[in-house]
Each structure stands twice: as C-alpha cells, then as structure tokens.
Amino acid sequence: MTFRALRVLKDGVNQSQLVTMDWDQLAPGNVLIEAEWSSINYKDALAITGRGKILKKFPSNPGIDVAGRVKQSDDPRYPLGMPVLVTGCGLGENQDGGLAQYVKVPAEWVIPLPPGLSPRDAMIFGTAGFTVGICLHRLLRNDQTPDKGPMVVTGASGGVGSLAVAMLAKLGFEVIAVSGKDEQKEPLRALGAARVMRPEELELGQKPLETVRFGGAIDNVGGPLLEGILRHVNLWGNVASVGLAGGHTLQATVMPFILRGVSILGISSTNCPRPLREEIWKKLAGEWKPRSLDAFVSREITLDAVTMAAEEMLERKTSGRTLVKLT
C-alpha cells in the first residue's frame, strides 16, 4: 500500500520533501494507523526545516502528533477502525512521525480517543493542549488556587499559550496573557484573558524578592522573563515551566523558593507516563475542554503546504494551532 508523506532525507537544512512510501518502509511498530489529522508544533518546524536536531535518524518522517483510525494491529486493545491518537513518546523523533498518511508505532504509545473528541479535535489539542493538561494537573496537585492571585501565561499567542489562557480561565483563574503581538490582544481577551500585556509592560523588578503580584504562571519563554516573574509570585504559588523561546538559562536567586515557598514545576510531555497520559486526555475531552476548540485553529493545510508553514512558524509569523489534514 502506497501513501504520501513528508520525509526528511538527511541531516541538514531544507532536506525535506513529499514522497510516496510503502507501509514496509516505516519504522517497526505493531499498530498501523491510517492518519486523518496532524498538526505543526515548534519542534516539528525545527525538524522539517533542519534548523534543530530533532530527528534521530534519516531518512525519517517528522510530526510529533497524529490522530486517525487503526488499520492493522496485533494488540487486542486496538481493534480495526478504533479512533486513536499518539503524541510525543518519540514520534517524529526516533520513530516515523505524524506528517504522513500512515503511521506505525508501538502499541504502548497509542491512546484510544476519549468520548467527546474527534480526531480533528484531538489535533487541535495535540502536544500543545496535552502539555497544558500536564501543567493543570501539576498546578492543581500542588494546591494552585485562584485566591493566590492572577496566573501569568507567557507566549500567550502560541499554541500552548492560547490553550492555557482558555483552560485556566475556565477553571476560574484570573489570567494575565503576555504576548509581544499587539494584534493578538482581542483574540486573547476573547479566550478569557482578563488582561493582555507585552512583556515589558509587566515592569518586573530586579530585587531578589519583589512585591507580590501573581499567583503563579505557565511560562513558555524561560530566560529573563521567567526570572522576573518568579520574584513576584505569591506565597506557595507555582510556576509551570514549559518552554525556552526566550532562553534556556535561569539566573535566579533562591529567595522566592525559601522565603515564599514558590515552586517551579517542570513539564515534559514526551515522556509522560501512560496512566497519567490517559487521565489527562480524558480531562481534555471533558471538564477541561474549552467551549470552542475552533477558536484555537489559525489555519488548516495539507501536506503540500507544511514546509512553508514550518518556515513561517520559525519566523514568528503564526499564532494558534496549524492543523494538517491528511485524508
């Protein structure tokens, strides 16, 4: 059986192209999925363009997300036609990924699609929404409550950020959305942000401890912005660290941790344990599901447009979620 796939042929910049493949050319796995939808994440953009060391072998299909239906399986948990999804776990890194019409993976990576989510819905969430789900799980388990103060969401116009704004607001938190894109102010307010600010408008101080202004944060940026936010977090507040768009270093003092009990919660979606993965997807399909998932979709494209979309993402010309229709 032949199918279309975006394939990165070798290491280096601009080595991806659309190809026709056979099932037996895919990396080994005991569940074959007929893919319906995928999405483009920042990590995918790095892999597609060759600007990041994401793929571990060549040639390889990028794409860390996919949703579709089981085409073949030797595992009784996944009968023919079952709607399923896969995010992370090495998909699109050391295993041929979701930017293809067929995907073959180990059975342990496969999550049955929860009631309330279509394959398209699942990819509106994708790794971005699943990452927000881990954030909420860890924040709530560590006693983050609305009465501690507003939650800051940095990088709020991106996939993770926009979903975080809406999901925190749904849970009753006041949300301060931080974005350098002025054109995103009204869309972010529509998602539930009480305030939308540029990073410099936060006016973060430089002392080891500053006046309490925030209950906590979901941070996609890292670097100096994360350092500044930590100095303003309330007693026993939490900051979920998700990304490093502003830098991978953290030059902070221990003062917020030892004098206010502030916690940094590390968020790693790729290697999330399967039981927790299943629990979070059920909540995304239920109590955490935003009112309108379509509000997060900036565009739908086909495989033919993926390379251009990846370039635009790295040039910061995109917002929200980019879906890839594979059927």
Image (cartoon, grey):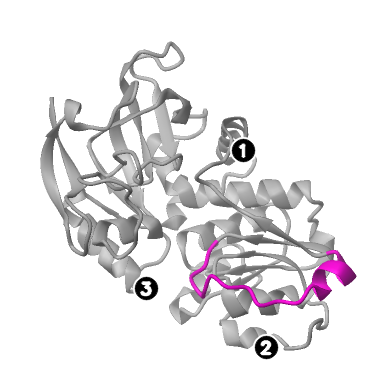
Per the image, the residue denoted by label 1 is 283
User: Which of the pair 163/14 is nearer the observer?
Assistant: 14
- The residues tagged by marks 2 and 1 sit, at their Cα atoms, a distance apart of 35 Å
On screen, residue 189 versus residue 262, left or right, reads: left
On screen, residue 230 versus residue 68, left or right, reads: right
Q: Quadrant of the N terminus?
A: top left
In what element is the residue under mark 2?
A: loop
Amino acid on which disc 3 is placed: Arg
- The residues tagged by marks 3 and 1 sit, at their Cα atoms, a distance apart of 30 Å
Q: Nearer the viewer, mark 3 or mark 1?
A: 3
- Magenta span main SS: loop
Determine crowd level at label 3: few under 14, some 14-19, many 20+ residues with C-alpha closer than 10 A: few
Determine crowd level at label 1: few under 14, some 14-19, many 20+ residues with C-alpha closer than 10 A: some
- The residues tagged by marks 3 and 2 sit, at their Cα atoms, a distance apart of 24 Å
On screen, residue 176 versus residue 270, left or right, reads: right
Per the image, the residue denoted by label 2 is 203
User: Which of the pair 284/250 is nearer the observer?
Assistant: 250
In what element is the residue under mark 1?
A: helix
Residue 318 percent coordinates (x, y) = 36, 68
